[in-house]
Image (cartoon, rainbow, N blue to C red):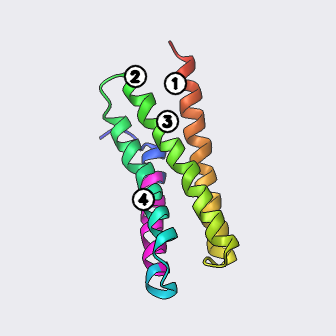
Amino acid sequence: MKGSNIIVEKSYVFALDIVKLCFYIQREKKEYVLSRQLLKSGTSIGANVEEAVGGISKADFLAKMQIAYKEARESHYWIRLMKDSMLLEEQVSHKMINNCEELLKILSAILKTGKSVK
């Protein structure tokens, strides 16, 4: 097996945290609409990263990473909205926002590097 792939690992852990968080919000807060949006976008990041890793070309790889980046932006939005609407406690939202921003930085760097390499 090759060495670890940081974006694969971090996007998977983030998705797992999102699943746990959304199920908690649905169970404890009885909120289903926003949590479903976050569940979809937050788990889509890792799914698109996995697809990118298995891409058939550089263009395919970059397209999937771009989708992962967009899903991370959307997740960032939903987490902030849930925090500001008092659905998420400050400590939880701070952790999730930081993790999401870390994913955004990594994905941005991957995209920038991928687009500059001919």
Q: Is residue 117 left or right of residue 23?
A: right
Q: Which residue carries the number 3 mark?
A: 66
Whether 101 is drawn above or below 95: the answer is above
Which residue extends farthest bottom?
A: 28
Q: Give whichever of 109, 65 is nearer the camera.
A: 65
Quadrant position of the N terminus in the picture? top left
Residue 40 marker: 4
Between marks 4 and 2 in the image, the one whose residue lies nearer the viewer? 4
Neighbour class for label 4 at 10 Å: few (<14), some, many (≥20)?
A: some
Label 1 to label 4, Cα distance in Å?
26 Å
Q: Which residue carries the number 1 mark?
A: 114
Main SS class of the magenta portion in the image: helix
Whether 77 is drawn above or below 26: the answer is above
The numbered mark, 4 or 3, whose residue comes first in the sequence reads 4
Q: Amino acid at mark 4?
A: Lys
Q: Which residue carries the number 2 mark?
A: 58
Q: Residue at x 42, y 77 (%)?
A: 23
Q: Residue at x 40, y 30 (%)?
A: 61
Q: Position of residue 85 (x, y in %)?
A: 67, 75
Label 4 to label 3, Cα distance in Å?
16 Å
Neighbour class for label 1 at 10 Å: few (<14), some, many (≥20)?
A: some
Q: Is residue 15 magenta?
A: yes
Magenta range: 11-25
Discs 3, 1 touching: Cβ within 8 Å: no
Q: Position of residue 96 (x, y in %)?
A: 59, 64
